[in-house]
């Protein structure tokens, strides 16, 4: 059986046994996504490369800590990627006044250097998630995007939007739950 | 203050936790609460799944082709370090020698993967520096920051003691000719110096743990749902007689409970010491071993009632095995 036919979880089990080819297979599947997320948030190619490198080193070192019963592999992987990127973002902005950016900007970035087949799949996923985001109430979408892509804490968002902290918490919670329901089973299992 | 046992006060923060949008205090309260609340753990998993979808909401940009080579090189270096550790404690590790990844181009190694930096220097202060690098490479940035902080404190206090000592010498000389009031001042300064020396000794103890060549850190531990949540490093002595567990990022144990270390020997869980953490979730635990430290096959940390338990509870907060 070729590695390309393995599920993410099966590859991760191979990585626990220090199988380098399994890691390379996961890298082929998800490095573009990890790099793209970090690049969108940091707007810095070098830093995004460092983040992507750290994320896959973490996968290599910590594969055994993934618990299949606690969610999908992609949830675990993008959780690591997002957290690492947030750390980098906050390190850069520590002590500085941050402005609320136009959160729709991320929709307009240009893709580059991507294979046509992957691009088609990626664009399809992108469109699917974007549609789910657009279907959220504006207030819920706004707090989610500001926190996830902008790296703002809930308290910062409440202050800057002049809304009660409890309102921000509630909107974020409702929005994330709706996203989960709307996108359940709609995103590909990219490798199979 | 929010009580971490209060479900109603904690659950509204789960969404913020799932997207890393809480300040440190709120994050710690959530992590403390999650240890004992299955409902919140389940809801958090759902919220994290919702959040992970957002990674697909950005246009794709491919990473540079050389990045995979760099990762491979870093892993090579990682495994070389691991191999050298094992040699130092008398173990072999066949898996560490299997990879055969050629590098297509010159690569930029991460700082912790540079074996020349990590092993090419061999004496004095350099040895301490090497060990700090090794600890940091294995344990991640938080423990690295912690060790760096302590090293900086040691250096600062060293300088302070030197200047105090110089001042003291001058004043002692003067005191021979001085009034009793000045002599009393010298006595106060002497006490201050003693206190500083004691503090410095405490710090040196920590540095000793992380800097002596025959100590090694073969295992990395992690726990919690947050990818960068609690961390730990097991530090064992090559003699097998002693081992320490250094943890960071653990929430304070709930009232009436403590953390307890467990070591696994051939399938049996051996209870270790109980411990608590400071306000930053940090602790260094002497494992008080009953066997050879180099023979362990796994270590974990659980939450137990005060006084500890003979059998581990289900509330495991850190888990790791020899890698």
Image (tube, coloured by chain):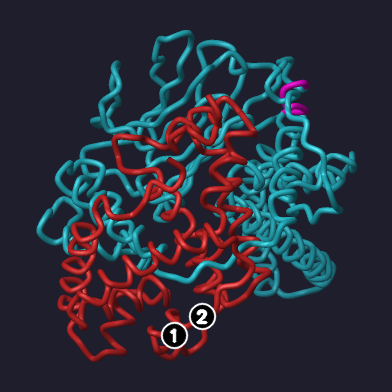
Chain colours: A red, B cyan
SS under mark 1 = helix
Residue B132 image point, x, y percent: 71, 46
| Residue at (74% x, 27% y) in the render | B83
Q: Is residue B85 magenta?
A: yes
Q: Which residues are magenta?
A: B83-87
Prevailing secondary structure class for the magenta stretch in the rendered image: helix
Q: From the viewer's perspective, is the residue at label 1 or at label 2 nearer? A: 2
SS under mark 2 = loop
Q: Nearer the viewer, residue B88 or B244?
A: B88
User: Of the numbered discs in the image, which one, if any, rests on residue A105?
Assistant: 1
Q: Are marks 1 and 2 in contact (CB under 8 Å)?
A: yes
User: Of the numbered discs in the image, which one, if any, rests on residue B153?
Assistant: none
Q: Is residue A153 magenta?
A: no
- Where residue A49 sits, quadrant-wise, is bottom right
Q: Locate the C terminus of chain A by quadrant.
A: top left
Q: Which residue is mark 2?
A: A109
Q: Nearer the viewer, residue B54 or A148?
A: B54
Q: Is residue B187 above or below residue A66?
A: below
**Host chain of mark 2:** A
Mark 1 surroundings: few (<14), some (14-19) or many (≥20) residues within 10 A: few
Marks 1 and 2, how far apart in space? 7 Å
């Amino acid at each position: 059986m070729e590695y390309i036919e393995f599920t993410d979880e099966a590859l991760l089990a191979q990585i626990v046994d220090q199988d380098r080819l399994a890691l390379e297979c996961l890298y082929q599947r998800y490095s573009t996504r990890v790099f793209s997320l970090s690049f969108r948030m940091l707007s810095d190619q070098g830093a995004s490369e460092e983040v992507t490198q750290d994320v896959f080193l973490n996968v290599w070192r910590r594969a055994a800590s993934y618990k299949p019963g606690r969610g999908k592999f992609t949830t675990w992987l993008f959780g690591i990627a997002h957290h690492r990127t947030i750390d980098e973002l906050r390190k850069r902005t520590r002590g500085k006044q941050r402005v609320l950016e136009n959160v729709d900007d991320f929709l307009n970035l240009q893709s580059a250097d991507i294979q046509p087949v992957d691009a088609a799949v990626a664009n399809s996923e992108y469109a699917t998630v974007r549609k789910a985001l657009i279907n959220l109430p504006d207030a819920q979408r706004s707090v989610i995007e500001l926190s996830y892509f902008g790296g703002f804490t809930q308290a910062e968002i409440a202050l800057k939007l002049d809304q009660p902290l409890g309102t921000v918490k509630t909107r974020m919670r409702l929005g994330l739950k709706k996203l989960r329901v709307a996108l359940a089973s709609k995103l590909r299992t990219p490798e199979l | 203050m929010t009580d971490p046992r209060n479900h109603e006060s904690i659950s509204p923060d789960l969404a913020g936790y799932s997207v890393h949008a809480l300040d440190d205090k709120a994050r710690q309260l959530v992590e403390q609460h999650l240890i004992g609340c299955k409902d919140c753990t389940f809801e958090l998993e759902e919220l994290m799944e919702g959040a992970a979808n957002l990674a697909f909401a950005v246009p794709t940009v491919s990473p540079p082709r050389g990045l995979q080579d760099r990762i491979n090189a870093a892993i090579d270096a990682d495994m070389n370090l691991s191999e050298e550790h094992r040699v130092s404690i008398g173990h072999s590790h066949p898996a560490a020698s299997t990879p055969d990844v050629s590098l297509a181009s010159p690569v930029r190694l991460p700082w912790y993967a540079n074996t020349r930096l990590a092993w090419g220097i061999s004496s004095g202060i350099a040895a301490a520096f090497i060990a700090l690098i090794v600890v940091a490479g294995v344990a991640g940035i938080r423990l690295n920051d912690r060790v760096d902080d302590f090293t900086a404190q040691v250096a600062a206090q060293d300088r302070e003691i030197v200047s105090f000592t110089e001042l003291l010498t001058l004043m002692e000389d003067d005191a021979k000719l001085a009034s009793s009031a000045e002599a009393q001042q010298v006595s106060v300064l002497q006490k201050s110096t003693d206190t500083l020396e004691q503090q410095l000794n405490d710090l040196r103890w920590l540095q000793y743990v992380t800097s002596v060549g025959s100590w090694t850190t073969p295992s990395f531990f992690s726990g919690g749902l947050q990818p960068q949540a609690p961390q730990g490093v097991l530090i064992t002595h090559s003699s097998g007689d002693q081992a320490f567990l250094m943890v960071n990022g653990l929430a304070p144990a709930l009232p009436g409970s403590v953390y307890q270390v467990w070591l696994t020997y051939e399938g049996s869980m051996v209870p270790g010491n109980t411990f608590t953490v400071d306000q930053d979730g940090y602790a260094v635990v002497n494992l008080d071993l009953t066997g050879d430290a180099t023979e362990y096959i796994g270590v974990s940390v659980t939450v137990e009632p005060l006084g500890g338990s003979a059998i581990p509870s289900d509330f495991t907060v850190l888990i790791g095995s020899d890698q």
